Image: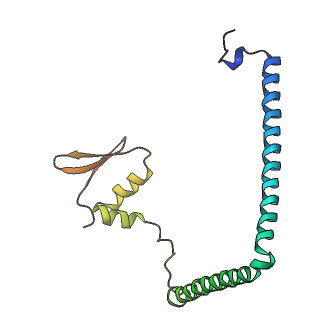
Amino acid sequence: MPVINRPELKRFRQKALESTVMALGTLVLKVVLIGFTLALWGFSFGYVTDRLFAPDALTTTVRMLLFLIGFALTAFLIMLAWAKYNIFWYAKKDRRQTPPPLTPQMMAAYYNTDLDFMTAAATCKVGTVEMSGGELVFCDDKTCFPIREFGK
């Protein structure tokens, strides 16, 4: 029987059966995987607690826990000191300010062109920058004007 790769040619019963089988398979797989994971966590927890709190390993466990607490406390104090240092030196600086919006006057000064041409360029929907006679020229659907030197 040939495989139908076009879903619009499949009958409704076939689509419903495939969807049901996929949904049930996914549900069973998820339930089995979740159950298996929980069982492994339970067995692992039991094994670790039996090994850690055995009478002969109790002193080693206490030393390990004290070392881990000391290491975590040291890391916390280093990060806290670094945060306080940054706040002390950099908190009052306005570094995350958004720059002021560009005005047509600023753009005209940057592109070294007239303010009338810059406002016309701002209102046009489509424009191109072309090279004409050795200088840059901005053209929209109606007018063209020269852009002299950038940033002068």
Q: Quadrant of residue 125?
A: top left
Residue positioned 20% across, 51% down in the render: 135
Which part of the image, by quadrant, shows the N terminus?
Answer: top right
Taking the image as shown, residue 146 lies to the left or right of residue 43, namely: left
Percent position of residue 54, x then y: 80, 75
Task: Specify the farthest residue to the top.
Answer: 1
Percent position of residue 86, x then y: 53, 85
Percent position of residue 2, x then y: 66, 10
Residue positioned 47% across, 71% down in the render: 99
Camera-side residue of 55 and 135: 55
Q: Quadrant of residue 66?
A: bottom right
Percent position of residue 118, x then y: 36, 57
Q: Is residue 65 above or below residue 19?
A: below
Task: Report the label total.
Answer: 0
Camera-side residue of 50 and 7: 50
Task: Specify the farthest residue to the front.
Answer: 56
Taking the image as shown, residue 7 lies to the left or right of residue 107, namely: right
Camera-side residue of 28 and 13: 28
Task: Specify the farthest residue to the left.
Answer: 134
Q: Is residue 36 above or below residue 13?
A: below
Q: Quadrant of residue 148?
A: bottom left
Taking the image as shown, residue 66 lies to the left or right of residue 74, namely: right
Residue positioned 65% across, 81% down in the render: 72
User: Which coloring applies here?
Assistant: rainbow
Which part of the image, by quadrant, shows the C terminus?
Answer: bottom left
